Structures are given as C-alpha cells and as structure tokens.
Image (spheres, grey):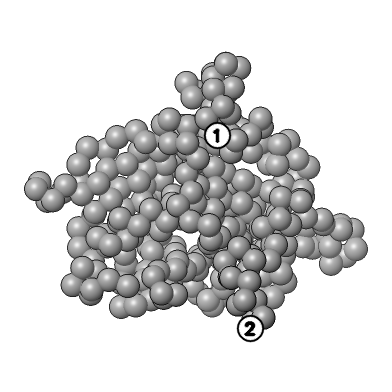
C-alpha cells in the first residue's frame, strides 16, 4: 500500500475520543427546533435519533513532534426506535457519528442474522456489525470470532487499498486490562497499529482511539471503523444477552426471528454498483 518506511509504528499520530453521556439532555438535541436543524443538515439524522455523546480529536503536529490540542469534532446518535423502544429480542443497535456542523460521517449497524449464524457455528453468542462511512461506498464488516477457549475477545475486519490490495486487522481484547481495552493488530508485520482505551464511570464512559501508524492515521475510513467500534463497546453485554436468549429460544421452537428491512437492504447485491455492464458476464 505505502512504502514500508512510512509504515513504521511509532508515537501516537491521531487521537479520537468518544465521550458518551449518561442522560438524554444535551445541548446538541435540546428542543424541537434544534432537532429540526440537524435533520435539515442531513437526512441521516432520523426522527428517532437520540444524541448519546460527543467526539473529540487531535492530530500529529510534525513541528512539535506530538499530537496537537484535542478539540471537539462532532456528536454520536443512537436510533432509539430500533433499540430502546423495541422488544428485547427484536433490538438492533444502530449508531451514527456526525460532525459539529451536523454532517453525517459514519454509521454502525448490528447485523442480527449474521450474529445468529456465527453463534450457531461457535455455540456461543458472537457479535457482527457493518460500518458505512461517508468517504467510501463500500461496507466494512466487523465480526467477532472465536480463537480458542483461552483467548480474549477478538474481532476481524479489512479495508481495501489501491488496485484491489487490502489490509487485514484484528481487534483483540487486552488480557491485563482493568476495563474493556483493545489492541488493533495489522496482519502485515503483526504490529499493533492502534489502541482503544475504555474508561467507564457514572457519566456514561469515555473511549479513546490512539492510532500509531502514520499512514492509517490519515485514513479516515480506518479511523471511522475504530470510532464506531468504540461506541459499541458499552452495548456489547446487552447485545450478547439478547442473542443468547434468542438463540436458545429459537432452538426450542419458542422464537422465530425476522430481519428489519433496513438490515435486508444491506444484503443487496453490490456488484451492479461496482462493476461495468460488460464485466457482469464474467462474474
């Protein structure tokens, strides 16, 4: 992808913090007029949007050889009709990240059918979601995988580069961690290119992504994936409990899950969007 001299993992080149609130009363959404303003900025700000946190960011300053000031960059919403207002076994987590000006940046959507399939194969509840980012038309699947009885939590994803090349990553839970902290490991070189530090408390939680690869620090697609993952961290327990209950009830014939049409739409054949008409004959 890039010259390996540029890829040496070093200091922190980019910091992205997701600070989640404990209540629903925040400046970003307080009042009907404010909600209408956000909706006028982007159709991604749905009528069931609940602002659940803010985002902050700092970038490497070459002259000072350190990350510059951490500044407010945007906010996070949760689609509460699909989560809080839904029946327990029908819940589906959807979170979105916006800029300070209300422009949509990224969405993470739970993929329930994929979770049931993965859980059936592993005989334990596993999570799956896709990330949709504003700077790419491609979906990124982030799947929890089982590596063995003694392993920590593990997730896998990949991102495409130029000329069809791609890079693969593993998000691995840190064993000696007081919170839910993770290392992001790049397959090429088996290097830790990013970290996710989780700080839980009475005020929701703070989740900080630090990117240590200079090339990936400039890759907004990669950074949005980690931002979305960090927001999902505090919901994991509820998601697993839901899948576990639904999985066991389904096996006993006491539950028959169905997919929301928004999830079905993400399964549509994408080739017509990415291939030329004459290429379709060779697929």
Q: Residue furthest left?
A: 63
For the point 58% across and 70% down, the residue is 275
Query: In this rendering, would 186 be left or right of 32?
Result: left
- The answer to whether residue 228 is visible is no
The alpha-carbon separation of the residues under discs 1 and 2 comes to: 38 Å
Indicate the position of residue 110 as horizontal and vertical percent values. 63, 54
Indicate the position of residue 226 as horizontal and vertical percent values. 43, 54
Q: Residue furthest bottom?
A: 282
Residue 118 picture quarter: bottom right
Circle number at residue 271: none
Q: Residues within 10 Å of mark 2 (few under 14, many from 20)?
A: few
Q: Residue furthest front?
A: 278
Q: For mark 1, what is the residue? A: 42
For the point 68% across and 66% down, the residue is 269
Q: Is residue 97 above or below residue 173?
A: above
| Element at label 1 | loop
Q: State which quarter of the image contains the C terminus.
A: bottom right
Q: Is residue 135 above or below residue 193?
A: above
Nearer to us in this view, 118 or 240: 118
Residue 4 picture quarter: bottom left
- The answer to whether residue 250 is visible is yes
For discs 1 and 2, the disc positioned in front in the rendered view: 2
Q: For mark 2, what is the residue? A: 282
For the point 57% across and 66% down, the residue is 274
Indicate the position of residue 29 as horizontal and vertical percent values. 54, 23
Nearer to us in this view, 197 or 138: 138
């Amino acid at each position: 992808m890039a010259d390996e001299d540029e890829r040496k993992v070093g200091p922190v080149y980019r910091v992205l913090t997701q600070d989640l609130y404990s209540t629903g009363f925040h400046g970003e959404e307080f009042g009907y007029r404010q909600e209408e303003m956000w909706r006028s900025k982007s159709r991604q700000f749905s009528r069931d949007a609940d602002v659940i946190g803010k985002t902050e960011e700092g970038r490497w300053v070459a002259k000072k050889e350190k990350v510059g000031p951490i500044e407010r960059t945007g906010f996070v919403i949760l689609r509460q009709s699909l989560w809080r207002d839904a029946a327990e076994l029908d819940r589906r987590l959807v979170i979105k990240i916006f800029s300070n000006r209300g422009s949509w940046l990224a969405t993470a959507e739970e993929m329930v059918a994929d979770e049931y399939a993965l859980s059936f194969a592993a005989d334990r509840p596993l999570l799956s979601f896709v990330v949709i980012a504003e700077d790419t038309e491609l979906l990124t699947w982030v799947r929890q995988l089982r590596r063995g009885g003694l392993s920590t939590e593990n997730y896998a994803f990949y991102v495409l580069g130029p000329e069809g090349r791609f890079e693969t990553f593993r998000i691995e839970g840190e064993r000696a961690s007081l919170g839910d902290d993770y290392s992001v490991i790049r397959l090429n070189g088996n290097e830790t290119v990013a970290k996710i530090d989780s700080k839980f408390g009475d005020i929701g939680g703070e989740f900080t992504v630090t990117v240590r690869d200079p090339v990936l620090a400039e890759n907004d697609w990669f950074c949005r994936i980690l931002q979305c993952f960090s927001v999902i961290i505090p919901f994991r327990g509820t998601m697993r409990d839901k899948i576990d209950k639904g999985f066991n009830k389904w096996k006993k014939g006491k539950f028959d899950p169905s997919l929301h049409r928004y999830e079905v739409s993400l399964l549509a054949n994408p080739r017509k969007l990415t291939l030329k008409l004459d290429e379709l004959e060779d697929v």
